[in-house]
Image (spheres, rainbow, N blue to C red):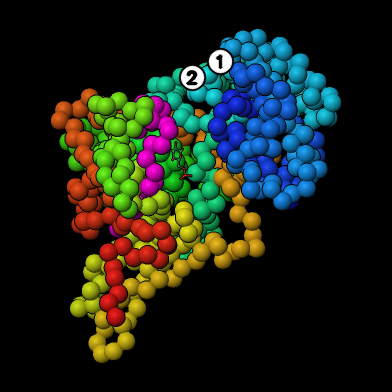
Amino acid sequence: MKKTENQMLVIFGASGDLTARKLVPALFNLFIAQQLPENFVVLGVSRSDMTDMDFRNKVVLESTYLKERIANLKSNYISKFSDQFFYEDLGSDYDTSYDGLRKRIADLKNEHNTSGNIIYYLSTPPTLYETIAKNLAKAGLNTQRNGWKRLIVEKPFGYSLDTAKALNEGLQHHFREQQIYRIDHYLGKETVQNLLVTRFANSIFEPLWNRNYIHHVEITNAESVGVEKRGGYYDKSGALRDMFQNHLLQIVSLIVMEPPISDAPEDIRNEKVKALKSLRIMKDEKTLHIQTIRAQYMASSIDGEQVQGYREEEGVDSDSTTETYAAIKFFVDNWRWEGVPFYVRTAKRMPTKVTEAVIHFKTPHHQIFQDSGMNSKDNKLVIRIQPDEGILIKFGVKVPGQGFKVERANLDFYYSNLAQTHVMEAYERLLLDCMQGDATLYARADEVEAAWEFVDPILDYWKNGKNVRMYGYAAGVWGPENADELIDGIGFWRNPGPNLTDDPGFCVIC
Ligand code: BG6
Protein backbone atom coordinates (compact mmCIF):
# COMPACT_ATOMS: atom_id res chain seq x y z
CA MET A 1 0.00 0.00 0.00
CA LYS A 2 1.44 3.36 -1.07
CA LYS A 3 1.86 5.79 1.83
CA THR A 4 -0.20 8.94 1.47
CA GLU A 5 1.65 12.13 2.34
CA ASN A 6 0.40 14.41 5.11
CA GLN A 7 -2.05 16.93 3.75
CA MET A 8 -5.20 19.00 4.17
CA LEU A 9 -8.43 18.68 2.23
CA VAL A 10 -10.33 21.94 1.86
CA ILE A 11 -13.89 21.41 0.63
CA PHE A 12 -15.69 24.42 -0.86
CA GLY A 13 -19.46 24.03 -0.73
CA ALA A 14 -19.05 21.83 2.34
CA SER A 15 -22.58 22.37 3.59
CA GLY A 16 -23.99 20.91 0.36
CA ASP A 17 -25.32 17.45 -0.25
CA LEU A 18 -22.29 16.00 -2.06
CA THR A 19 -20.03 16.43 0.96
CA ALA A 20 -22.26 14.45 3.31
CA ARG A 21 -23.51 11.98 0.70
CA LYS A 22 -20.33 11.08 -1.14
CA LEU A 23 -17.14 12.74 0.07
CA VAL A 24 -17.30 12.07 3.80
CA PRO A 25 -18.41 8.40 3.40
CA ALA A 26 -15.50 7.98 0.96
CA LEU A 27 -13.12 9.49 3.52
CA PHE A 28 -14.63 7.24 6.18
CA ASN A 29 -13.85 4.17 4.06
CA LEU A 30 -10.29 5.37 3.64
CA PHE A 31 -10.09 5.94 7.41
CA ILE A 32 -11.24 2.39 8.13
CA ALA A 33 -8.83 1.01 5.57
CA GLN A 34 -6.08 3.10 7.25
CA GLN A 35 -5.33 4.86 4.01
CA LEU A 36 -5.70 8.41 5.20
CA PRO A 37 -2.45 10.29 5.79
CA GLU A 38 -1.01 10.17 9.30
CA ASN A 39 -1.59 13.89 9.73
CA PHE A 40 -4.74 14.91 7.98
CA VAL A 41 -7.37 17.59 8.32
CA VAL A 42 -10.60 18.30 6.44
CA LEU A 43 -11.59 21.95 6.37
CA GLY A 44 -15.15 22.55 5.21
CA VAL A 45 -15.74 25.98 3.67
CA SER A 46 -19.05 27.49 2.68
CA ARG A 47 -21.46 30.31 3.35
CA SER A 48 -23.39 28.71 6.19
CA ASP A 49 -22.89 29.82 9.74
CA MET A 50 -21.57 26.67 11.47
CA THR A 51 -19.06 25.79 14.14
CA ASP A 52 -16.55 22.95 13.80
CA MET A 53 -18.84 20.86 15.99
CA ASP A 54 -21.93 21.66 13.89
CA PHE A 55 -20.02 20.54 10.82
CA ARG A 56 -18.87 17.30 12.49
CA ASN A 57 -22.43 16.56 13.52
CA LYS A 58 -23.79 17.31 10.08
CA VAL A 59 -21.39 15.29 7.99
CA VAL A 60 -20.29 12.55 10.39
CA LEU A 61 -21.94 12.07 13.77
CA GLU A 62 -25.54 12.72 12.75
CA SER A 63 -25.22 12.06 9.04
CA THR A 64 -27.86 9.78 7.57
CA TYR A 65 -25.24 8.57 5.10
CA LEU A 66 -23.03 7.18 7.87
CA LYS A 67 -25.65 6.27 10.44
CA GLU A 68 -25.65 2.52 9.84
CA ARG A 69 -21.92 2.33 9.38
CA ILE A 70 -21.08 3.98 12.69
CA ALA A 71 -23.94 2.56 14.78
CA ASN A 72 -21.87 -0.28 16.23
CA LEU A 73 -18.51 1.40 16.40
CA LYS A 74 -16.87 2.64 19.58
CA SER A 75 -17.34 6.35 20.13
CA ASN A 76 -13.65 7.07 20.59
CA TYR A 77 -12.95 5.41 17.23
CA ILE A 78 -15.58 7.59 15.54
CA SER A 79 -14.23 10.70 17.27
CA LYS A 80 -10.78 9.91 15.95
CA PHE A 81 -12.33 10.36 12.52
CA SER A 82 -14.69 13.27 13.21
CA ASP A 83 -12.05 15.25 15.15
CA GLN A 84 -10.23 15.75 11.88
CA PHE A 85 -13.09 17.90 10.56
CA PHE A 86 -13.12 21.70 10.86
CA TYR A 87 -15.25 24.43 9.39
CA GLU A 88 -14.71 27.96 8.10
CA ASP A 89 -17.57 30.31 7.24
CA LEU A 90 -16.74 32.46 4.22
CA GLY A 91 -19.54 34.94 4.88
CA SER A 92 -22.16 35.81 2.35
CA ASP A 93 -20.08 35.48 -0.81
CA TYR A 94 -17.41 33.22 -2.32
CA ASP A 95 -16.04 36.27 -4.10
CA THR A 96 -14.43 37.80 -1.07
CA SER A 97 -11.01 38.11 0.50
CA TYR A 98 -9.58 34.71 1.44
CA ASP A 99 -7.18 36.20 4.01
CA GLY A 100 -9.21 34.75 6.88
CA LEU A 101 -9.22 31.38 5.16
CA ARG A 102 -5.47 31.58 4.61
CA LYS A 103 -4.96 32.22 8.30
CA ARG A 104 -7.22 29.31 9.27
CA ILE A 105 -5.36 27.00 6.90
CA ALA A 106 -2.01 28.12 8.33
CA ASP A 107 -3.21 27.59 11.92
CA LEU A 108 -4.57 24.11 11.18
CA LYS A 109 -1.42 23.21 9.30
CA ASN A 110 0.74 24.19 12.30
CA GLU A 111 -1.50 22.59 14.92
CA HIS A 112 -1.87 19.31 13.06
CA ASN A 113 1.39 19.15 11.19
CA THR A 114 -0.31 18.56 7.87
CA SER A 115 2.56 20.12 5.85
CA GLY A 116 1.78 22.57 3.04
CA ASN A 117 0.12 19.96 0.84
CA ILE A 118 -3.47 20.94 0.11
CA ILE A 119 -6.31 19.66 -2.04
CA TYR A 120 -9.05 22.19 -2.77
CA TYR A 121 -12.25 20.36 -3.63
CA LEU A 122 -14.80 22.54 -5.44
CA SER A 123 -18.19 21.12 -4.64
CA THR A 124 -20.04 24.33 -5.45
CA PRO A 125 -22.14 25.35 -8.44
CA PRO A 126 -19.78 25.50 -11.45
CA THR A 127 -20.38 29.22 -11.87
CA LEU A 128 -18.19 29.68 -8.78
CA TYR A 129 -15.20 27.59 -9.91
CA GLU A 130 -13.27 30.41 -11.49
CA THR A 131 -14.12 32.83 -8.72
CA ILE A 132 -12.78 30.45 -6.09
CA ALA A 133 -9.64 29.68 -8.10
CA LYS A 134 -9.04 33.41 -8.56
CA ASN A 135 -9.45 34.21 -4.87
CA LEU A 136 -7.26 31.30 -3.82
CA ALA A 137 -4.56 32.64 -6.13
CA LYS A 138 -5.02 36.18 -4.83
CA ALA A 139 -4.45 34.96 -1.29
CA GLY A 140 -1.32 33.07 -2.42
CA LEU A 141 -2.98 29.75 -1.65
CA ASN A 142 -2.10 28.25 -5.04
CA THR A 143 1.68 28.46 -4.78
CA GLN A 144 3.61 25.23 -4.48
CA ARG A 145 6.66 26.62 -2.69
CA ASN A 146 5.69 24.86 0.53
CA GLY A 147 3.97 21.71 -0.56
CA TRP A 148 1.80 20.86 -3.56
CA LYS A 149 -1.65 22.32 -4.21
CA ARG A 150 -4.31 20.45 -6.19
CA LEU A 151 -7.74 21.54 -7.32
CA ILE A 152 -10.56 19.03 -7.79
CA VAL A 153 -13.53 20.19 -9.85
CA GLU A 154 -16.85 18.41 -10.24
CA LYS A 155 -18.76 18.15 -13.49
CA PRO A 156 -20.30 19.84 -15.43
CA PHE A 157 -17.09 21.09 -17.02
CA GLY A 158 -18.83 23.70 -19.08
CA TYR A 159 -22.15 23.77 -20.82
CA SER A 160 -20.83 23.71 -24.38
CA LEU A 161 -17.47 23.69 -26.14
CA ASP A 162 -17.06 27.45 -25.75
CA THR A 163 -17.95 27.53 -22.08
CA ALA A 164 -15.73 24.50 -21.40
CA LYS A 165 -12.82 26.26 -23.09
CA ALA A 166 -13.50 29.42 -21.12
CA LEU A 167 -13.63 27.44 -17.87
CA ASN A 168 -10.39 25.62 -18.65
CA GLU A 169 -8.67 28.89 -19.48
CA GLY A 170 -10.07 30.52 -16.37
CA LEU A 171 -8.82 27.75 -14.09
CA GLN A 172 -5.48 27.49 -15.88
CA HIS A 173 -4.96 31.17 -15.27
CA HIS A 174 -4.60 30.44 -11.55
CA PHE A 175 -3.57 26.77 -11.41
CA ARG A 176 -1.38 24.74 -13.75
CA GLU A 177 -3.12 21.99 -15.72
CA GLN A 178 -1.15 19.38 -13.73
CA GLN A 179 -2.75 20.76 -10.56
CA ILE A 180 -6.31 20.49 -11.90
CA TYR A 181 -8.19 17.22 -11.30
CA ARG A 182 -11.54 17.01 -13.11
CA ILE A 183 -13.52 14.33 -11.39
CA ASP A 184 -15.77 11.98 -13.35
CA HIS A 185 -17.09 9.44 -10.90
CA TYR A 186 -17.58 6.82 -13.63
CA LEU A 187 -13.82 6.60 -14.00
CA GLY A 188 -13.67 5.68 -10.33
CA LYS A 189 -15.85 2.65 -10.88
CA GLU A 190 -13.84 -0.54 -10.69
CA THR A 191 -15.64 -2.04 -13.68
CA VAL A 192 -14.94 0.97 -15.89
CA GLN A 193 -11.23 0.67 -15.09
CA ASN A 194 -11.52 -3.03 -15.81
CA LEU A 195 -12.22 -2.14 -19.42
CA LEU A 196 -8.54 -1.27 -19.72
CA VAL A 197 -7.47 -4.50 -18.08
CA THR A 198 -9.84 -6.65 -20.13
CA ARG A 199 -8.44 -5.16 -23.29
CA PHE A 200 -4.77 -4.79 -22.53
CA ALA A 201 -4.01 -7.64 -20.13
CA ASN A 202 -5.54 -10.39 -22.26
CA SER A 203 -4.19 -11.59 -25.53
CA ILE A 204 -7.52 -13.17 -26.44
CA PHE A 205 -9.48 -9.93 -26.84
CA GLU A 206 -7.11 -7.38 -28.31
CA PRO A 207 -6.49 -9.18 -31.62
CA LEU A 208 -10.25 -9.19 -32.20
CA TRP A 209 -10.78 -5.61 -31.08
CA ASN A 210 -11.26 -4.00 -34.48
CA ARG A 211 -13.44 -3.65 -37.54
CA ASN A 212 -12.48 -7.12 -38.84
CA TYR A 213 -14.24 -8.89 -36.00
CA ILE A 214 -16.54 -6.39 -34.31
CA HIS A 215 -19.91 -5.75 -35.87
CA HIS A 216 -21.06 -2.98 -33.59
CA VAL A 217 -20.68 -1.64 -30.08
CA GLU A 218 -23.64 -0.87 -27.85
CA ILE A 219 -23.59 1.02 -24.58
CA THR A 220 -26.61 1.39 -22.34
CA ASN A 221 -26.93 3.55 -19.29
CA ALA A 222 -30.38 3.28 -17.79
CA GLU A 223 -31.72 4.67 -14.55
CA SER A 224 -35.07 3.76 -13.08
CA VAL A 225 -35.37 7.03 -11.18
CA GLY A 226 -36.65 10.24 -12.71
CA VAL A 227 -35.01 13.59 -12.14
CA GLU A 228 -35.88 13.40 -8.43
CA LYS A 229 -35.33 16.73 -6.68
CA ARG A 230 -32.91 18.00 -9.32
CA GLY A 231 -35.48 19.20 -11.86
CA GLY A 232 -34.15 22.77 -11.80
CA TYR A 233 -30.62 21.66 -12.66
CA TYR A 234 -31.63 18.88 -15.03
CA ASP A 235 -33.97 20.99 -17.12
CA LYS A 236 -31.03 23.21 -18.08
CA SER A 237 -28.85 20.22 -18.72
CA GLY A 238 -30.57 17.13 -20.16
CA ALA A 239 -29.35 13.58 -20.69
CA LEU A 240 -26.71 14.49 -23.25
CA ARG A 241 -24.94 17.00 -21.03
CA ASP A 242 -25.63 15.20 -17.75
CA MET A 243 -24.43 11.70 -18.69
CA PHE A 244 -23.32 11.37 -22.30
CA GLN A 245 -20.77 14.16 -22.68
CA ASN A 246 -18.84 12.98 -19.65
CA HIS A 247 -19.48 9.49 -18.21
CA LEU A 248 -20.48 7.72 -21.40
CA LEU A 249 -17.90 9.29 -23.65
CA GLN A 250 -15.30 8.29 -21.05
CA ILE A 251 -16.45 4.70 -21.44
CA VAL A 252 -16.39 5.11 -25.22
CA SER A 253 -12.83 6.43 -25.09
CA LEU A 254 -11.67 3.37 -23.13
CA ILE A 255 -13.24 1.05 -25.70
CA VAL A 256 -11.97 2.99 -28.70
CA MET A 257 -8.44 3.93 -27.57
CA GLU A 258 -5.26 2.40 -28.92
CA PRO A 259 -3.00 0.51 -26.52
CA PRO A 260 -1.05 3.04 -24.43
CA ILE A 261 2.73 2.63 -24.18
CA SER A 262 2.47 2.18 -20.41
CA ASP A 263 0.02 2.65 -17.56
CA ALA A 264 1.48 6.10 -16.77
CA PRO A 265 -1.31 8.70 -16.43
CA GLU A 266 -0.20 10.78 -19.41
CA ASP A 267 0.24 7.74 -21.66
CA ILE A 268 -3.33 6.63 -20.95
CA ARG A 269 -4.79 10.12 -21.16
CA ASN A 270 -3.02 10.83 -24.46
CA GLU A 271 -4.63 7.77 -26.02
CA LYS A 272 -8.06 8.70 -24.64
CA VAL A 273 -7.82 12.15 -26.18
CA LYS A 274 -6.84 10.64 -29.53
CA ALA A 275 -9.83 8.32 -29.27
CA LEU A 276 -12.25 11.16 -28.56
CA LYS A 277 -10.79 13.22 -31.38
CA SER A 278 -11.41 10.38 -33.80
CA LEU A 279 -15.19 10.30 -33.21
CA ARG A 280 -16.81 11.43 -36.43
CA ILE A 281 -18.49 14.74 -35.74
CA MET A 282 -21.99 14.86 -37.17
CA LYS A 283 -22.43 18.12 -38.98
CA ASP A 284 -25.28 17.95 -41.46
CA GLU A 285 -28.93 17.90 -40.42
CA LYS A 286 -29.67 14.73 -42.36
CA THR A 287 -27.09 12.70 -40.42
CA LEU A 288 -28.14 14.26 -37.13
CA HIS A 289 -31.75 13.49 -37.95
CA ILE A 290 -31.05 9.83 -38.67
CA GLN A 291 -28.45 9.17 -36.01
CA THR A 292 -29.86 10.83 -32.93
CA ILE A 293 -33.03 10.27 -30.94
CA ARG A 294 -34.22 12.30 -28.01
CA ALA A 295 -37.24 11.73 -25.85
CA GLN A 296 -38.93 12.63 -22.58
CA TYR A 297 -40.63 10.36 -20.09
CA MET A 298 -44.35 10.76 -19.64
CA ALA A 299 -46.70 10.04 -16.77
CA SER A 300 -47.37 6.39 -16.25
CA SER A 301 -48.02 3.80 -13.66
CA ILE A 302 -45.13 1.58 -12.58
CA ASP A 303 -45.98 -1.46 -10.46
CA GLY A 304 -49.29 0.12 -9.57
CA GLU A 305 -47.71 3.41 -8.55
CA GLN A 306 -48.58 6.56 -10.45
CA VAL A 307 -45.44 8.30 -11.70
CA GLN A 308 -45.23 11.91 -12.91
CA GLY A 309 -44.18 12.85 -16.40
CA TYR A 310 -40.98 14.86 -16.82
CA ARG A 311 -42.81 18.11 -17.54
CA GLU A 312 -44.77 17.77 -14.30
CA GLU A 313 -41.62 17.38 -12.17
CA GLU A 314 -40.72 20.13 -9.72
CA GLY A 315 -38.39 22.73 -11.24
CA VAL A 316 -39.10 21.61 -14.81
CA ASP A 317 -40.63 23.95 -17.35
CA SER A 318 -44.09 22.74 -18.39
CA ASP A 319 -43.10 23.26 -22.06
CA SER A 320 -39.64 21.86 -21.59
CA THR A 321 -37.81 20.35 -24.57
CA THR A 322 -35.03 18.92 -22.44
CA GLU A 323 -34.35 15.26 -23.19
CA THR A 324 -34.45 12.59 -20.51
CA TYR A 325 -33.58 9.96 -23.11
CA ALA A 326 -30.78 10.27 -25.63
CA ALA A 327 -29.65 7.63 -28.09
CA ILE A 328 -26.83 8.35 -30.50
CA LYS A 329 -25.34 6.36 -33.34
CA PHE A 330 -21.89 7.35 -34.48
CA PHE A 331 -18.72 6.18 -36.20
CA VAL A 332 -15.07 6.43 -35.34
CA ASP A 333 -12.77 7.66 -38.06
CA ASN A 334 -9.63 5.65 -37.65
CA TRP A 335 -8.03 2.50 -39.00
CA ARG A 336 -9.25 0.25 -36.20
CA TRP A 337 -12.91 1.25 -36.22
CA GLU A 338 -13.67 2.21 -39.81
CA GLY A 339 -17.31 1.32 -40.56
CA VAL A 340 -18.19 -0.01 -37.08
CA PRO A 341 -21.30 1.70 -35.70
CA PHE A 342 -21.43 2.67 -32.04
CA TYR A 343 -24.82 2.95 -30.37
CA VAL A 344 -24.95 4.72 -27.05
CA ARG A 345 -28.06 5.54 -25.05
CA THR A 346 -28.75 7.02 -21.65
CA ALA A 347 -32.06 7.70 -19.97
CA LYS A 348 -34.05 8.25 -16.81
CA ARG A 349 -37.18 6.31 -15.87
CA MET A 350 -36.21 3.09 -17.59
CA PRO A 351 -37.39 -0.31 -16.34
CA THR A 352 -34.20 -0.88 -14.33
CA LYS A 353 -30.90 0.70 -13.32
CA VAL A 354 -28.11 -0.72 -15.41
CA THR A 355 -24.95 0.31 -17.24
CA GLU A 356 -23.19 -2.00 -19.63
CA ALA A 357 -21.08 -2.05 -22.77
CA VAL A 358 -21.69 -4.80 -25.28
CA ILE A 359 -19.23 -5.73 -27.99
CA HIS A 360 -21.12 -7.54 -30.73
CA PHE A 361 -18.82 -9.67 -32.83
CA LYS A 362 -19.44 -10.49 -36.46
CA THR A 363 -20.96 -13.83 -37.32
CA PRO A 364 -18.45 -16.37 -38.66
CA HIS A 365 -17.39 -15.47 -42.19
CA HIS A 366 -18.23 -18.89 -43.53
CA GLN A 367 -21.32 -20.61 -42.14
CA ILE A 368 -20.94 -24.36 -41.87
CA PHE A 369 -24.02 -24.90 -39.77
CA GLN A 370 -26.58 -23.62 -42.20
CA ASP A 371 -29.67 -24.34 -40.14
CA SER A 372 -28.15 -23.53 -36.85
CA GLY A 373 -29.91 -20.27 -36.24
CA MET A 374 -26.44 -18.73 -35.80
CA ASN A 375 -27.08 -15.82 -38.09
CA SER A 376 -29.03 -13.78 -35.65
CA LYS A 377 -26.96 -14.81 -32.64
CA ASP A 378 -23.61 -13.10 -32.68
CA ASN A 379 -20.88 -13.63 -30.13
CA LYS A 380 -21.10 -10.96 -27.51
CA LEU A 381 -18.81 -9.65 -24.83
CA VAL A 382 -20.90 -7.92 -22.19
CA ILE A 383 -19.03 -5.70 -19.78
CA ARG A 384 -21.42 -5.03 -16.95
CA ILE A 385 -20.54 -1.80 -15.17
CA GLN A 386 -23.40 -1.88 -12.69
CA PRO A 387 -25.17 -3.61 -10.99
CA ASP A 388 -24.16 -7.28 -10.77
CA GLU A 389 -20.74 -6.18 -11.99
CA GLY A 390 -18.94 -8.64 -14.18
CA ILE A 391 -18.16 -9.89 -17.65
CA LEU A 392 -20.14 -12.23 -19.82
CA ILE A 393 -19.15 -13.91 -23.04
CA LYS A 394 -21.85 -15.41 -25.21
CA PHE A 395 -20.74 -18.18 -27.49
CA GLY A 396 -22.29 -20.98 -29.49
CA VAL A 397 -22.60 -24.55 -28.24
CA LYS A 398 -24.13 -27.56 -29.85
CA VAL A 399 -27.59 -28.53 -28.71
CA PRO A 400 -27.38 -32.23 -27.77
CA GLY A 401 -29.01 -34.53 -30.28
CA GLN A 402 -28.93 -35.11 -33.98
CA GLY A 403 -27.64 -32.53 -36.41
CA PHE A 404 -25.82 -29.33 -35.55
CA LYS A 405 -28.25 -27.05 -33.87
CA VAL A 406 -26.42 -24.24 -32.14
CA GLU A 407 -27.53 -22.36 -29.05
CA ARG A 408 -25.93 -19.54 -27.09
CA ALA A 409 -24.19 -20.36 -23.82
CA ASN A 410 -22.78 -17.99 -21.22
CA LEU A 411 -19.29 -17.78 -19.81
CA ASP A 412 -19.47 -15.39 -16.93
CA PHE A 413 -17.37 -13.73 -14.25
CA TYR A 414 -18.76 -11.76 -11.31
CA TYR A 415 -16.92 -9.22 -9.23
CA SER A 416 -18.90 -10.42 -6.24
CA ASN A 417 -16.94 -13.68 -6.45
CA LEU A 418 -13.94 -11.70 -5.30
CA ALA A 419 -15.70 -11.17 -1.97
CA GLN A 420 -12.51 -11.14 0.05
CA THR A 421 -11.32 -8.08 -1.88
CA HIS A 422 -12.69 -4.72 -0.86
CA VAL A 423 -13.98 -3.01 -4.00
CA MET A 424 -13.48 0.71 -3.49
CA GLU A 425 -16.34 3.11 -4.08
CA ALA A 426 -15.75 5.55 -6.95
CA TYR A 427 -15.22 8.63 -4.78
CA GLU A 428 -13.01 6.70 -2.38
CA ARG A 429 -10.71 5.58 -5.18
CA LEU A 430 -10.61 8.96 -6.87
CA LEU A 431 -9.95 10.91 -3.68
CA LEU A 432 -7.12 8.58 -2.75
CA ASP A 433 -5.64 8.88 -6.24
CA CYS A 434 -5.66 12.66 -6.02
CA MET A 435 -4.14 12.53 -2.52
CA GLN A 436 -1.34 10.47 -4.03
CA GLY A 437 -1.00 12.66 -7.14
CA ASP A 438 -2.24 10.08 -9.63
CA ALA A 439 -4.32 11.79 -12.31
CA THR A 440 -4.93 8.72 -14.51
CA LEU A 441 -8.62 8.58 -13.67
CA TYR A 442 -9.23 12.31 -13.94
CA ALA A 443 -10.21 14.08 -17.14
CA ARG A 444 -7.69 16.40 -18.77
CA ALA A 445 -8.68 19.74 -20.34
CA ASP A 446 -8.17 18.55 -23.93
CA GLU A 447 -10.19 15.40 -23.20
CA VAL A 448 -13.14 17.43 -21.98
CA GLU A 449 -12.93 19.76 -24.95
CA ALA A 450 -12.73 16.87 -27.44
CA ALA A 451 -15.89 15.41 -25.89
CA TRP A 452 -17.69 18.74 -26.21
CA GLU A 453 -16.56 19.07 -29.80
CA PHE A 454 -18.50 15.90 -30.58
CA VAL A 455 -21.55 16.78 -28.48
CA ASP A 456 -21.97 20.46 -29.40
CA PRO A 457 -23.39 19.94 -32.92
CA ILE A 458 -25.97 17.47 -31.57
CA LEU A 459 -27.10 19.93 -28.92
CA ASP A 460 -27.16 22.68 -31.49
CA TYR A 461 -29.26 20.57 -33.85
CA TRP A 462 -31.68 19.61 -31.10
CA LYS A 463 -32.07 23.25 -30.18
CA ASN A 464 -32.07 24.97 -33.56
CA GLY A 465 -32.55 22.30 -36.23
CA LYS A 466 -35.58 22.11 -38.51
CA ASN A 467 -38.35 19.68 -37.55
CA VAL A 468 -36.38 18.06 -34.76
CA ARG A 469 -38.45 15.35 -33.15
CA MET A 470 -38.98 14.99 -29.42
CA TYR A 471 -40.52 11.63 -28.65
CA GLY A 472 -42.37 10.57 -25.57
CA TYR A 473 -42.08 7.30 -23.67
CA ALA A 474 -44.11 6.06 -20.78
CA ALA A 475 -42.09 6.14 -17.56
CA GLY A 476 -40.86 2.60 -16.94
CA VAL A 477 -40.36 1.39 -20.52
CA TRP A 478 -37.19 1.16 -22.64
CA GLY A 479 -37.59 4.53 -24.35
CA PRO A 480 -39.69 5.63 -27.31
CA GLU A 481 -41.17 3.08 -29.68
CA ASN A 482 -38.92 4.02 -32.58
CA ALA A 483 -35.69 3.65 -30.51
CA ASP A 484 -34.87 0.35 -32.21
CA GLU A 485 -34.88 2.00 -35.62
CA LEU A 486 -31.49 3.45 -34.81
CA ILE A 487 -29.85 0.03 -34.82
CA ASP A 488 -28.99 -1.09 -38.34
CA GLY A 489 -29.47 -4.67 -39.36
CA ILE A 490 -29.96 -6.21 -35.94
CA GLY A 491 -32.90 -3.96 -35.35
CA PHE A 492 -33.10 -3.84 -31.58
CA TRP A 493 -31.26 -2.80 -28.46
CA ARG A 494 -30.23 -5.38 -25.91
CA ASN A 495 -32.49 -4.41 -23.04
CA PRO A 496 -30.63 -5.84 -20.07
CA GLY A 497 -32.17 -7.01 -16.84
CA PRO A 498 -30.79 -6.48 -13.35
CA ASN A 499 -28.70 -9.65 -13.57
CA LEU A 500 -25.77 -9.98 -15.90
CA THR A 501 -26.94 -13.22 -17.47
CA ASP A 502 -30.55 -12.15 -17.97
CA ASP A 503 -31.26 -12.71 -21.60
CA PRO A 504 -33.59 -10.08 -22.92
CA GLY A 505 -36.37 -11.41 -25.03
CA PHE A 506 -35.23 -14.99 -24.58
CA CYS A 507 -37.16 -17.48 -22.56
CA VAL A 508 -36.69 -21.16 -22.02
CA ILE A 509 -39.81 -23.26 -22.34
CA CYS A 510 -39.32 -26.60 -20.65
C1 BG6 B 1 -24.55 11.93 -12.26
C2 BG6 B 1 -25.72 12.54 -12.95
O1 BG6 B 1 -23.34 12.43 -12.77
O2 BG6 B 1 -24.58 10.51 -12.42
C3 BG6 B 1 -27.03 11.96 -12.42
O3 BG6 B 1 -25.71 13.94 -12.75
C4 BG6 B 1 -27.01 10.46 -12.51
O4 BG6 B 1 -28.15 12.48 -13.12
C5 BG6 B 1 -25.75 9.90 -11.88
O5 BG6 B 1 -28.15 9.98 -11.80
C6 BG6 B 1 -25.64 8.42 -12.15
O6 BG6 B 1 -24.55 7.89 -11.45
P1 BG6 B 1 -24.52 6.34 -11.05
O7 BG6 B 1 -23.17 6.14 -10.45
O8 BG6 B 1 -25.64 6.13 -10.07
O9 BG6 B 1 -24.74 5.58 -12.31
- Front-lying residue, 72 or 78: 72
- Tell me if residue 82 comes above or below residue 417 in the rendering: above
Which residue in the rendered view is the most extreme toward the left?
Answer: 467
Q: Helix, strand or loop at disc 1?
A: helix
Does any atom of ligand 1 lie closer than 8 Å to the CB of label 1?
no
Marks 2 & 1, CB-CB < 8 Å contact: yes
At 41% from the left and 28% from the top, the residue drawn is 233
The C terminus, quarter of image: bottom left
In the displayed structure, does residue 443 sit left or right of residue 403? right
Image location (x, y in percent) of residue 171: 55, 21
Total marks shown come to: 2
Residue at 41% across, 50% down:
353
Percent x, y of residue 95? 58, 11
Using a 10 Å C-alpha cutoff, classify the residue at mark 2 as few (fewer than 14 neighbours), some (14 to 19) or many (20 or more). few
Q: Is residue 135 magenta?
A: no
Query: For mark 2, what is the residue?
Result: 127
- Disc 1 residue type (three-letter): Thr
Extent of the magenta region: 215-238
Residue at image point 60% right, 18% down: 47
Front-lying residue, 24 or 2: 24
Q: Residue at x 64, y 43 (%)?
A: 66
Instruction: Report the amino acid beneath label 2.
Output: Thr
10 Å crowding of disc 1: few (<14), some (14-19), many (20+): some
The residue identified by callout 1 is 131
The front one of 160 and 316 is 316
Q: Residue 423: x, y in percent?
A: 60, 54
Mark 2–mark 1 Cα distance, whole angstroms, equals: 8 Å
User: Where is residue 135 drawn, in percent x and y?
Assistant: 62, 14
Nearer to me, 104 or 446: 104
